[in-house]
Image (cartoon, rainbow, N blue to C red):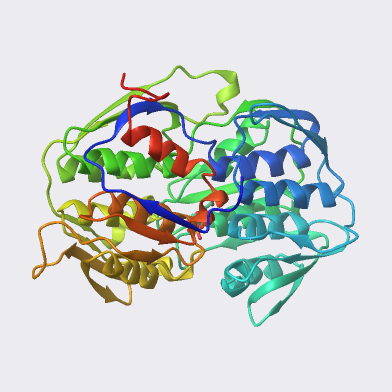
Amino acid sequence: MPPLTAVTIAPARRLHGRLRVPGDKSISHRYAMLAALAEGPSTLSHFAPGADCRSTLACLRRLGVDIREGPAGTVTLLGRGLHRLSSPSAPLDAGNSGTTMRLLSGILAGQPFPATIVGDASLSRRPMRRVIEPIERMGARIESIDGRPPLTIHGTRLHAIAHRPDVPSAQVKSAVLLAGLHAEGTTSVSEPAATRDHTERALIAFGGTVEVDGFTVSVPGGQRLAGRSLAVPGDFSSAAFWLVAAAALPGSRVEIEEVGLNPTRTALLDVLRRFGARVAVQHAAVEDSTGGEPRGTVVVESDRMGTIEITPDEVPGLIDELPAIAALAAHGGEVTVRGAAELRVKESDRIAALVAGFRALGLDADERPDGFTIRRSSSGPSSPSGGVADARGDHRMAMAFAVAALAAEQPSTIEGADAVVISYPDFFETLDRLVRPSTKLGAP
Ligand code: S3P
């Protein structure tokens, strides 16, 4: 398919359908990396199809891991064991993926060779001191350009640390825990707030030992992991765009099957209930292949609409859903987010990008250092006019603007819409089917 650089979104009255979303990006990165460090083969099904997880696979291949890709998102990796990756002959390319760069830094810190990780223009602007500082305290040395990529990691024998990051970040926690696997002693991370716990669950799934005490996670070094067969659940953060659209368009009903329901990821469901949507959740049975990751079916139907205020303590549990939540404003519910300065260092400066994009679609938006308020224009017509919004190369901006554009009076254009390849390559085809329910996905 040719790249979708600009996509036109027609206004829509409702969304209807039942679907699965692509495999979870966060979980796919972790399963691939732990499979590489495990002993024996691992088979991962419903592996995330987007470019970010492809970057992780490409980096692991460069580190000597044998990886085969089968049909329907199945990936088989032959693990090499801890400390047994190979020295790469060229830099590792993390592309647009912060998770690839930060988590791999932790792994490479414990390998007996130096390696360089590069990224695209967006990733090259993102802050890496948050992983450099703790990893260097463990004994490795990391060269960077003033705390930004490219990173050259000089791996060594590591010693355990107790790390207390200032900012809650699952990527930082995971990087330190992965380095801790290679360290002498027990490494711990004490976070200021709970963040997604996929690394902890994945370590246990691969036969590892992890101790969790409140917001402190510890891993003993030198443990052996064993290859596993695991099924990745659907990505809740991708589902979020459909859940928000269904909540916002009266008469909608969207049912998402086999989606991840890890409680560190699903805070959006309460936000949608607060907004006035009807939300039903049905958990699926736990099986060996589910790797300790809850999953099930979520149904969202629209009902009433309210205003939404996201407070700073809610932000870590909603960090990737805030762009989708912002789109509720286009459909008539004012959205205010506070305490989310971290959004400025994501794939784009998401506060600036959201404010600019929503204004371009005909909404009123206030920008603050740590958040925003977005509402329908008080001077214009009751629906936003529509317009041309720039995704600024950020997949979640493209999808948030598309959901907002469904409420507009006129068709809108999303520039840079091809960014959806990062996490949801089929996003626009799926949107098409959900707004025209007579086709394949159909009404239930
Ligand atoms: C992720 C953690 C979050 C999230 C990102 C994926 C992960 O980033 O925003 O999309 O897989 O650990 P931070 O750790 O920077 O909060």
Count of labels in the image: 0
Front residue of this view, candidates 62 and 35: 62
Q: Is residue 77 above or below residue 142?
A: above
Give the x, y percent position of residue 230. Answer: 63, 27
Q: In this view, does 280 lie above or below 191?
A: above
Residue 137 seen in the current view: yes
Give the x, y percent position of residue 195. Answer: 45, 51
Q: Quadrant of residue 209?
A: top right
Front residue of this view, candidates 368 and 132: 368
Residue 165 seen in the current view: no
Name the outermost residue toward the bottom.
146
Front residue of this view, candidates 60 and 58: 58
Is the N terminus in the top left, top right, bottom left or bottom right quadrant? top right
Q: Quadrant of residue 382?
A: bottom left
Give the x, y percent position of residue 365. Answer: 23, 70
Residue 324 in the figure: left or right of residue 408: right
Q: Residue at x 31, y 48 (%)?
A: 10
Q: Which residue is drawn at 56% across and 36% down?
A: 201
Give the x, y percent position of residue 233. Answer: 51, 31
Residue 324 in the figure: left or right of residue 229: left
Residue 232 in the figure: left or right of residue 84: left
Is the C terminus in the top left, top right, bottom left or bottom right quadrant? top left
Residue 306 in the figure: left or right of residue 388: left
Q: Residue at x 51, y 44 (%)?
A: 424
